[in-house]
Amino acid sequence: GAGVSQSPRYKVAKRGQDVALRCDPISGHVSLFWYQQALGQGPEFLTYFQNEAQLDKSGLPSDRFFAERPEGSVSTLKIQRTQQEDSAVYLCASRRGAAGVGEQYFGPGTRLTVT
Amino acid sequence: AQSVTQLGSHVSVSEGALVLLRCNYSSSVPPYLFWYVQYPNQGLQLLLKYTTGATLVKGINGFEAEFKKSETSFHLTKPSAHMSDAAEYFCAVSDRNAGNMLTFGGGTRLMVKP
C-alpha cells in the first residue's frame, strides 16, 4: 500500500511568489496534519484536518498561509507572497482515526527555498 | 503549553556501544510520548510510543524507552549501536485529552563510528 506522498519534493520560489504544496494521505485516513520543519529544528505543527473540516489552524504563522482539504482526502497548503523565513521543509502526516494515539504516518516532505 | 527538550543536538557512539538519547517534557498532565527517526530526505518513522500501562516500551530496530513520571523523562536507548542507526531522532508529545497535534523536540543527530 502507498504511504503519504507529497509534491513537489523541492520548490524554489522567488520572494513574493505564491506556492502550493500538495499532500496525498493514505487512503481512508480521516486525520491530516501539516508541520513546518526549519533547518536543524524539530517539526512544528501548522494545522489539522478531520475529513474536510479544518479543526485547528493555530500553528499557521500568518494569514499568508492557507490550507484546504475540500473532499476529505488530498490537501493543499498555500503560501502567498512568500518570504525568506518561509524556507523550510513542509511535512504532511495522516492518521487513520479521528482522535487518539493512532500513529501519524509522515510523507517525505516538500523542501521550500525562497530566494 | 507543552514543551520537549532533547539534551544534546549531536551524539556520537562507536558501533556496538550503548545508545542513550535524552528527552524531557514539560506538561501539566503526563502526555502521550513518542520517538521518531528521520533518515536523510525521508519522512519521520515511528520508533515507539507510550500511552498507558507498562512504562518500559519496546520499539522497532531494538530501541526501547522508559517513561519516568517523577523525572518527566522518556529517554531512548539501544544496547548496541549499528551503523544503520545513524539518523536524526525526535522525541514528541501529544496532549492526552485531544490526542492530536505532536509537539517535537529539537532533535538529536546520532552518529555511529566504525
Image (tube, rainbow, N blue to C red):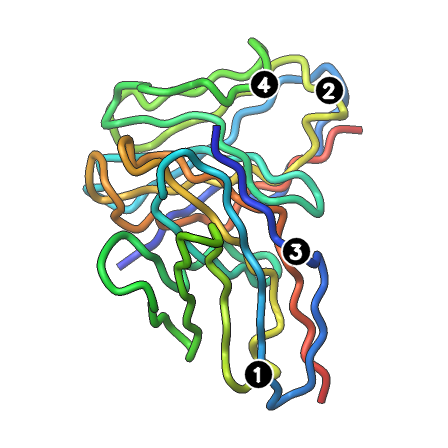
Q: Residues within 10 Å of mark 2 (few under 14, many from 20)?
A: some
Disc 4 residue type (three-letter):
Pro
The residues tagged by marks 1 and 3 sit, at their Cα atoms, a distance apart of 19 Å
Q: Position of residue B32 (x, y in %)?
A: 34, 47
Task: Name the quarter where the N terminus of chain A is drawn.
Answer: bottom left
| Residue denoted by label 3 | B7
Q: Are marks 1 and 2 on the same chain?
A: no
In this picture, residue B19 sits left or right of residue B47: right
Q: Are marks 4 and 3 on the same chain?
A: no
In this picture, residue A55 sits left or right of residue A109: left
Q: Which mark is residue A61?
A: 4
Q: Which mark is residue A83?
A: 2
| Residue denoted by label 1 | B81
Q: Quadrant of residue A75?
A: top left
Q: Secondary structure at mark 1?
A: loop
**Which label lies toward us, 2 or 3?**
3
